[in-house]
């Protein structure tokens, strides 16, 4: 059997004439890459047409096969590896504790900071269903990640509730256990548009928590930001439904963009204060290559906290666990101390206060690519290993090899990096592809 690893160099019209291919035979010898003409079957051509809908994303976001998978072959060929110990760490000593799983590349919103309509328009072609990991494949990979020390699993998208029968996946994941026999912290991030109708099924299936993205309480602002004219009232109804069915520690995430919705931060804080829901403000980030990010549209978290302090006294709170993304602030009572009944807010400051040194998160795309950073340019193809018959020990060895070599700390290095000029080597993966 011959496996062909192909990376496409798209010409101006997106032709398939010239492809740089590496051919690897059954005996694992690698032939020198060369320029060759390849005839594709109809299915491959169909996939290519889907890819080339957005040339800005084609080679990095939805590649046919990531050639770095070949680098795993020697390690996998050496035979059984040591069993996972639950204490996997990367080159900077960061453990693997959090796995974020994207279940779909589709979303029914077109927020400019994530899926701008001019890119993700009516002609944009998403991955075919056959390219997505099945629920059973996701569960199998999650089981291996748990053996390496993962304790929290977050389902993301796109919009994860667009994936049919998602509650079946939740039920499968809820049956898994961590290395110390505990139920994993199973949560989901959603835009809330379908939450009212899905909350009960998700809770019954074993979902612990939910995080809802909500960027404004002002209906006009919210409709402009989601760019599909979706009313804010329906998202608020979804949050209420989540509370009603007993989902715990509900969080609301607000991406704050200066000049767009930053005037809403105080109103949002007042609305959720004392509600039992934690509101988190997220700095507008330079994720992907399509959102037109500019530094002058970032409202630094320090300035945001100052704004809130003018209206709602806050006191700093200690982190609850290592690797937390949010800096916590509690609402102060009349005595000047944190009043738990009033709750808290958080700020996620990836741009101005990077937290790479404690990042313990891995991200798995809907088609089985493992990314080690939200700002990554490449992913590792685990789906091919799965579908070519790799055993759990081989999968565990591959994941260990990838994580051991992790050096990512983009946010700490952002200011010293050259500008992203949109070349394939620099192009960051889109947020809608691997989740936030």
Image: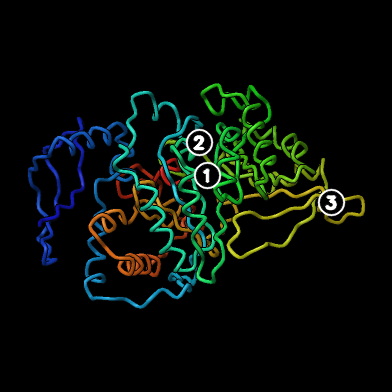
Q: Where is residue 427 in the image (x, y as percent from the top left)?
A: 36, 45
Q: Residues within 10 Å of mark 3 (few under 14, many from 20)?
A: many
The answer to whether residue 6 is left or right of residue 369 is left
Q: Residue furthest front?
A: 204
Q: Are marks 1 and 2 in contact (CB under 8 Å)?
A: yes
Of label 1 and label 2, which has the lower sequence position?
A: 2
Which residue is painted at 88% across and 50% down in the image? 333
Q: Residues within 10 Å of mark 1 (few under 14, many from 20)?
A: many
User: Label 1 to label 2, Cα distance in Å?
Assistant: 8 Å
68 above or below 43? Answer: below
Q: Residue furthest bottom?
A: 82
Residue on which the image places disc 1: 285
251 above or below 148? Answer: above
User: Label 3 to label 2, Cα distance in Å?
Assistant: 33 Å
Quadrant location of the N terminus in the rendered image: bottom left
Q: Residue 332 carries which label?
A: 3
The answer to whether residue 144 is left or right of residue 152 is left
């Amino acid at each position: 059997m011959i496996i062909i690893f192909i990376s496409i160099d798209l010409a101006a019209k997106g032709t398939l004439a010239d492809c740089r291919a590496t051919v690897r035979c059954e005996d694992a010898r690698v032939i020198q890459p060369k320029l060759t003409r390849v005839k594709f079957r109809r299915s491959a051509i169909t996939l290519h047409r889907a890819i080339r809908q957005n040339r800005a994303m084609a080679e990095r976001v939805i590649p046919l096969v990531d050639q770095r998978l070949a680098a795993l072959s020697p390690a996998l060929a050496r035979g059984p590896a040591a069993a996972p110990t639950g204490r996997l760490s990367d080159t900077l000593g960061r453990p693997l504790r959090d796995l974020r799983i994207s279940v779909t590349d589709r979303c029914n919103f077109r927020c400019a900071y994530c899926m701008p309509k001019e890119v993700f328009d009516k002609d944009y072609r998403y991955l075919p269903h056959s390219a997505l990991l099945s629920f059973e494949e996701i569960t199998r990979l999650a089981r291996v990640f748990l053996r390496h020390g993962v304790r929290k699993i977050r389902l993301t998208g796109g919009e994860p509730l667009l994936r049919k029968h998602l509650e079946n996946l939740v039920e499968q994941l809820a049956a898994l256990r961590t290395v110390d026999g505990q139920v994993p912290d199973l949560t989901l991030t959603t835009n809330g548009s379908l939450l009212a109708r899905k909350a009960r099924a998700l809770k019954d299936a074993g979902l612990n928590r939910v995080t809802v993205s909500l960027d404004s309480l002002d209906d006009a602002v919210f409709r402009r930001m989601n760019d599909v004219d979706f009313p804010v009232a329906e998202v608020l109804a979804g949050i209420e439904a989540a509370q009603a069915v007993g989902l715990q520690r509900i969080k609301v995430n607000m991406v704050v963009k200066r000049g767009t919705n930053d005037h809403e931060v105080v109103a949002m804080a007042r609305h959720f204060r004392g509600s039992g829901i934690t509101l988190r403000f997220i700095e507008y980030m330079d994720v992907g290559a399509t959102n037109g990010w500019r530094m002058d549209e970032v409202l630094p978290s320090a300035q945001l906290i100052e704004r809130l302090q003018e209206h709602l006294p806050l006191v700093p709170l200690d982190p609850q666990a290592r690797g937390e993304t949010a800096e916590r602030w509690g609402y102060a009572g009349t005595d000047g101390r944190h009043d738990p009944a009033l709750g808290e807010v958080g700020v996620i400051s990836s741009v101005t206060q990077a937290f790479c040194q404690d990042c313990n998160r891995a991200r798995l795309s809907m088609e089985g690519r493992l990314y080690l950073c939200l700002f990554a340019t490449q992913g590792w193809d685990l789906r091919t290993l799965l579908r070519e018959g790799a055993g759990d020990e081989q999968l565990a060895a591959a994941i260990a090899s990838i994580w051991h070599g992790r050096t990512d700390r983009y946010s700490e290095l952002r200011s010293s990096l050259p500008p992203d000029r949109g070349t394939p080597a620099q192009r960051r993966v889109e947020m809608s592809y691997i989740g936030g």
